Image (cartoon, helix red, strand yellow):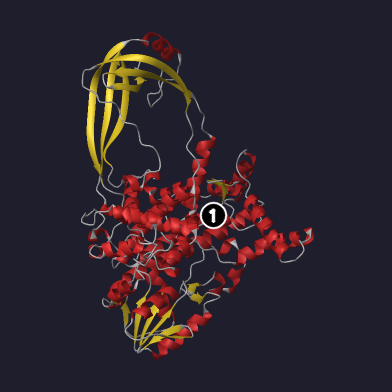
Amino acid sequence: MRLIIAEKPSLARAIAEALPASAQRREGYLEAGDTIVSWCVGHLLEQAPPDAYDASFKTWRRDHLPIVPQRWKLVPRPKARGQLSVLRGLLKRASSVVHAGDPDREGQLLVQEVIEYLGWKGPISRLLISDLNRPAVTRALARIEDNARYLPLYRAAEARSRADWLYGINLTRAWTLIGRQAGHDGVLSIGRVQTPVLGLVVKRDEEIRDFTPYPFYVLWAQLAVSAGQLKAWWVPGEHHRLDDRGRLLERPPADELAARLKGAEGRLAELDRRQRRQPPPLPYSLSALQVDAARRHGLSAKAVLDICQRLYERHQLITYPRSDCRYLPREHLGGMPALLASACARDTVLSSWLNNADMSLRSRAWDDSKVGAHHALSPTGKPFDPARLSKQEADVYRLITRNVLAQFYPPLETCEVKAEFHILDERFRASGQEIIAAGWKPLFTTREETPPLPSLRQGESCRVLDTEVEDKQTRPPEHFTDASLIKAMMNIARYVENSEVRRTLRDTDGLGTEATRANIIETLIDRCYLVREGKALRATQLGVALIHSVPPAVGRPERTAVWEQRLEDIANQGDPAPFLDALVTDLHQLVAAADTQRLAQALGEARRHQGIPDAAAPRKRRRSTTTQRTGKSGRSKSSSSQRKSRSSSAPARRQRRSPKDS
């Protein structure tokens, strides 16, 4: 009997439906002739807690740290025992096993650790599926590989899991213990990814807080030329008082020049016309979709991820969503016209876009050399009926389909014009853009474009019709939002000063992965390090104090770059032992750096700063929501003594839960 183990039930159903024999539903698996398809439900196993290695570790003590297991253990997750029992029984009957985890490092780990935990010693094959549509699954079943090819990927994922455990468990315990001494009653969670993300927000908030605005002045001149009128701005000379961006810091020179300009004549001294051809935006990766969906529809990163999972699993309308790739395989190109015709048929917006598409065009998106474990998000071709989806699901589906449709539109062609006029021995500049061919732009346009300049000729004369001096003021950077924070995590190299580390981060997935970025943001909110204020994400007093109390390297993204380098080496046949040994050495130094006085000082400074949100605010909102729900069930509100009792026991409950980092 052949046993196929899928990562989740939806994938198992898709596999069973693509098998030649009709599948029968059993308890925990599907049976189709001599093939049985079973499944995991996400991770069935997790790293054992510290007290599984030594009972004394149940008590959090500084002299225990760092805790380093000599022989690693996995334990079943609380709700996984039933499915593990099913898989154990099936493995005893199996003659061969097919690993059908998701096609990435974590997917390789998730299924393989179960196979090894249950003691299977026989042959293992690998089935890679990124599209749940039956034709795609049938093609994948015809291309089953030897799982041995993916063992280095598994070792890299295993090393990442163990390293995150070592880092998160030991630093969380160290800072929680000094937090108690500093007067903080609760767990202070630290993680390789979540803490640098928090560091980004803290740094941005402080840039805004410490920003001192100053005024500057812009002189505009309304000019008449032979073909019409335009507005040009004055370029002050270096003898004026300017900032580092060339902005005028004193108004009198602008007023004086404005008074002399009325009716003055000049000429067009420089004219630069450049035609540009811009290819259509690529299909989406998950993070790119999260950024656009946040901007266009106000959706949080977590909401977009959840919607994509439903579109993939429940509705089977899109391909595997947790992809970091923005390219599509060439083999998909031939079937794309029929696929898009089916995907767009029942929606007026998509149908109108499809009607204007040219299926003979070939964009840069079809590139096998840039497709790795996943390809970009794409519709599966299953008919899309907006009436059967929520509005948010339909909005996200249209975005995904639009970006694939755009590959069959011509480039956007524009003419960008820059002009410099000389009037009264002063320079004035104007710019504009003319759309020559709209190409794909109508699918994306949501705002007015820069108006074009009238037709201009080098050397032609101009005359000043009117002037205006505009008072302006410098503005601080904006607070992070879901969209901008996800984008920062995708492009984390921009926030790193070391050029070698910056290069590594550009070559990897940035900070976090497509599958974890949304959850990292939600985790930081749940742990009261961040709060949402409208669309803005802001660090709380607790979050600010934590970043100021940890060693600088803990709150910056450089460590992720080093880890990714070493994990990539392991995935390419490297040995994981040196990577973990180096981490243990590092942990001794980091644990020793935990300083009660430094944390107490950081907490005090954060509380004194006005404008930093209180960490208790999110908890109050959640408690209020819970109270309303209990009210509907007919239960009375808790008395103050009961609330106080629950509050005092909460830190102890949190301490017993093993901290894990995304």
Q: Amino acid at mark 1?
A: Leu
State the image quarter where residue 111 is shown. bottom left
Badge 1 marks a residue whose secondary structure is: helix
Residue at horizontal 66%, vertical 56%? Answer: 185
Whether residue 185 is visible? yes
| Disc 1: CA contacts within 10 A as few (<14), some (14-19) or many (>=20) | some
State the image quarter where residue 450 is shown. top left
Whether residue 112 is visible? no
Above or below — where is 495 with respect to 251? below
Rendered location of residue 58, percent (x, y):
60, 69
Residue at horizontal 54%, vertical 70%? Answer: 49
Q: Nearer the viewer, residue 648 or 301?
A: 301
Q: Nearer the viewer, residue 472 or 527?
A: 472
Rendered location of residue 514, percent (x, y):
40, 59
Rendered location of residue 245, percent (x, y):
38, 27
Q: Nearer the viewer, residue 46 or 553?
A: 46
Number of numbered discs? 1
Instruction: Give the side of residue 149 with respect to residue 114, left or right.
Output: left
Please, which residue is most extreme toward the top here?
Answer: 260
Above or below — where is 428 with respect to 67? above
State the image quarter where residue 23 is shown. bottom left
Q: Which residue is mark 1?
A: 524
Above or below — where is 354 with respect to 342? above
The quarter of the image holding the N terminus is bottom left
Rendered location of residue 428, percent (x, y):
32, 19
Residue at horizontal 26%, vertical 58%? Answer: 370
